[in-house]
Image (cartoon, rainbow, N blue to C red):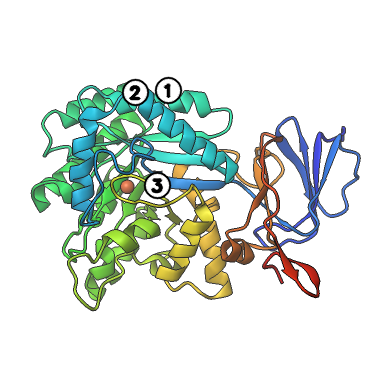
Amino acid sequence: MSQADLLIARVNLPDGRTGVDVAVREGRIVEVGVGLPRTAAEVVEGAGLLLSPPFVDAHFHMDSTLSYGLPRINQSGTLLEGIALWGELKPLLTPEALIERALRYCDWAVARGLLAIRTHVDVCDPRLLAVDALLEVKRRVAPWIDLQLVAFPQDGVLRSPGALANLQRALDKGVDVVGGIPHFERTMADGAESVRMLCEIAAERGLRVDMHCDESDDPLSRHVETLAAQTVRLGLQGRVAGSHLTSMHSMDNYYVSKLLPLMAEAQLHVVANPLINITLQGRHDTYPKRRGMTRVPEQMAQGINVAFGHDCVMDPWYSLGSACMLEVAAMGLHVAQMTSQAAMRQCFEAVTSNAARVMGLQGYGLEPGCNADFVLLQASDPVEAIRLRATRLGVWRRGVRIASSPAAQATLLKPTGPAVVNWRL
Ligand code: FE2
């Protein structure tokens, strides 16, 4: 075999392998094994640190990101005030400002090793200003980030006049995925009709589907059932995602026992958004307050692919966030009480390999033949990475280092002499 360009030596992998070398040539991983020859042009000493494929965010809103406070702050903290606030902001948007905010967020993402993002883009504004802006952002960040766009009719494809035509125009322009929001339509029947219509559009165009679905505390919001049934009817298995699905938290257990197998049969992907839904849901409750995240462990146990998304960063719905998918994984872990060793590792997969499956990414992973895209973390395994929100010491894309951060540590200035603390055992 000819000489490698890059060797990342003696790293641990998320699947539990330890002390492994990863060799890269011409942007691809060519060999993974123990004790590979150190003849590469560049050798990076991994020293028992975790090398992970990049973080993947399967659910984001890049058209609203970093707009917090524009034109005002969400006072109630509810989803519905967030949607109303976004409606106030939309007429004020300019392509220049939107692109600048999105690119700033993409820089944060690269620094955090977040190299694939599926973003919804609101198509209810007939100018399609955000669509054009994010298509431009997608083009500009392509060397570093796989950005996938979802045509999202935020105000309801049936409820909002002209939304269907706008959605079709957005798809004509090159938006990748068909979105929807059935629980925001005027009636349950309209919601179901929107799901049928949008899935048919996806089937006709050969596209994937990702719907905001049942983002509600209403246990009778059952559009996920329709989404799964339409997926099967149209032969879209494995190509459809249900995002949020928070009503499942409140549903009757017997009904869920029938629903989960249908979702599995449809090979429906699920994207839970723990940071957002732990803050937005349960707002009408006094005490006890429902957590409002979908039933993640039960879905995983059923063989359903579940990812965790960031959803929002500093916008009308969420005032925090920093493109850190480990923070997302940590919140998902806590809200779902996924505390066993195996479950904590599943939470790491929810922001890496599971999310890559939602997006249908090609060449993702740490096997020979995969793209040489990876992150070296200041942690030895996925659980420690989540616990520490581990520093991304290095980020590589196609074998080229595109970001680095200094190791996180503090120096204690004790009378007995300086001591270094880095919170690792
Ligand atoms: Fe969302």
Q: Position of residue 235 (x, y in %)?
A: 33, 43
Q: Determine whether the residue tagged by mark 2 lies in a helix, strand or loop.
A: helix
Query: Which one is earlier in the sequence, the residue at label 3 or at label 1?
Result: 1
Residue at 49 percent across and 47 percent down: it is: 323
- State the separation of the CA atoms marked 2 and 1: 10 Å
Query: Nearer the viewer's eye, disc 2 or disc 1?
Result: 2
Q: Determine whether the residue tagged by mark 1 lies in a helix, strand or loop.
A: helix
- Residue 284 visible in the displayed image: yes
Residue that mark 2 sits on: 95
Q: Label 3 amino acid? A: Val
Which of the labelled discs sits on residue 266, or is there none?
none
Query: Which one is earlier in the sequence, the residue at label 2 or at label 1?
Result: 2
Q: Is residue 154 left or right of residue 300?
A: left
- State the separation of the CA atoms marked 2 and 3: 19 Å
Residue that mark 1 sits on: 136
Q: Position of residue 198 (x, y in %)?
A: 23, 38
Query: Nearer the viewer's eye, disc 3 or disc 1?
Result: 3
- State which quarter of the image contains the N terminus: top right
Residue at 28 percent across and 46 percent down: it is: 316
The quadrant holding residue 258 is bottom left
Which of the labelled discs sits on residue 313, or is there none?
3
Q: Position of residue 281 (x, y in %)?
A: 26, 62
CB atoms at circles 3 and 1 under 8 Å apart? no
| Nearer-the-camera pick, 118 or 390 | 390
Q: Is residue 365 above or below residue 214?
A: above
Q: Label 2 amino acid? A: Pro
- Determine the residue located farthest toward the front in the rendered image: 415
Q: Is residue 273 above or below residue 370?
A: below
Q: Label 1 amino acid? A: Glu
CB atoms at circles 2 and 1 under 8 Å apart? yes
- Residue 134 visible in the displayed image: no
